[in-house]
Image: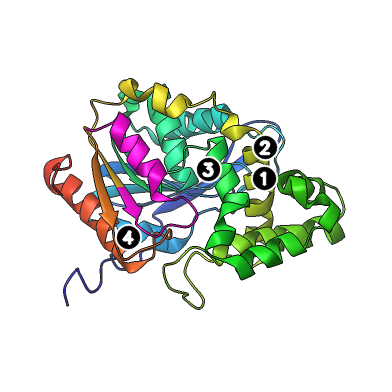
Amino acid sequence: MSQHDFPLFPPIEPRRAGMLPVDALHTLYWEESGNPAGVPVLFLHGGPGGGTSPRQRCFFDPAHYRIVLFDQRGAGKSTPLGEYRDNTTPLLIDDIERLRRLLGIDCWLVFGGSWGSTLALAYGQEHPDRCLGFILRGVFLCTQPEIDWFMHGIRWFFPEVHARFTGAIPAEERGELLQAYARRLFCDDPAIYMPAAREWSRYEAACLFLRPVPAAGDEPDDDAVSLGVGRLEAHYFLHHGFLAEDQLIRRIDRIRHLPAVIVQGRYDMICPPATAFRLHAAWPQARLDVVDDAGHSAFDPGITRALVAATEQFRRTGGFDREG
């Protein structure tokens, strides 16, 4: 039984977990697993709004890593679910720092995919002295071309999926698809916002993998996941991630000295490879691993192998060789 065949570490349970109030509205779920004296690693989930799942603990050797997962504002087990008020990238960065101080961690390895890569870069550029390095997957910089691709460009590869996504909106509103979805997602009537959230979540889930995977590990399967993903992705898209134009590229010098690896599926339809290549061009000190037989999901087999290989290399060396 080789790691190549079974790349994830065995399932584990958290050693401890809790709820962290961060303001009068939001309370965050967090958990720790693995070695309490190990190298701290922070897992940042995607979406925004995707939440964490038990399988995400398994990218890390639990004998070596102190594994920290948490659900961002409005996501997963954090409350209130789907809440977009007082939910911005600067506030998420503050939440990460609050959690770090609560756990008594000085510095940690930051691991994030998709929106998690966005937040990892934003957090790292704000607090580089708290980061040991970065493992980034399916890079998303939250620029307008990337948002346009998600809303419209995917139709070139998944026309039937996109047709269902747009078909949930009356024809006269489809010219402003994001705004049309937002009007439904942000209303107060569950008879209106839940169908919209389900369609949004189903659209994304259908495009995650290189090949369709029934009952996939990170495919939304309930209304709670759909509401978090639908509302918060639309919220962050409308505000360009609460980032200045090209902020994450322009501020790369703040983290250039830290070890990093970028894992990118060649056929990623959610976050196409051009963005990862653009980030690498600005940050050539980081290693870029393109997985030629993979899409977007962290659980596409080739992506999983590359991510576990990265956590194992960091375990052994504290960094990432340029050649992998």
Task: Write down the residue under mark 1.
Answer: 234
Q: Is residue 43 above or below residue 279?
A: below
Q: Is residue 105 above or below residue 195?
A: above
Residues tagged 1 and 2 counted as in contact (Cβ below 8 A): yes
Residues tagged 1 and 4 counted as in contact (Cβ below 8 A): no
Label whose residue precedes the other's in the sequence (4 or 3): 3
User: What residue is rendered at 43% in x and 30% in y?
Assistant: 123
Q: Position of residue 86 (x, y in %)?
A: 68, 32
Q: Which label belongs to residue 238?
A: 2
For badge 2, the amino acid type reads Leu
Task: Write down the residue under mark 4.
Answer: 303
For badge 3, the amino acid type reads Glu
Q: Is residue 94 above or below residue 203?
A: above
Q: Which label belongs to residue 146?
A: 3
Please tell me whether mark 2 or mark 3 is closer to you in this view: 3
- Which one is nearer the viewer's eye here, 101 or 148? 148
Label whose residue precedes the other's in the sequence (2 or 3): 3
Q: Quadrant of residue 238?
A: top right
Q: Which label belongs to residue 254?
A: none
Q: Position of residue 20 (x, y in %)?
A: 56, 39
Q: Seen in the image, is 13 located left or right of residue 150?
A: left
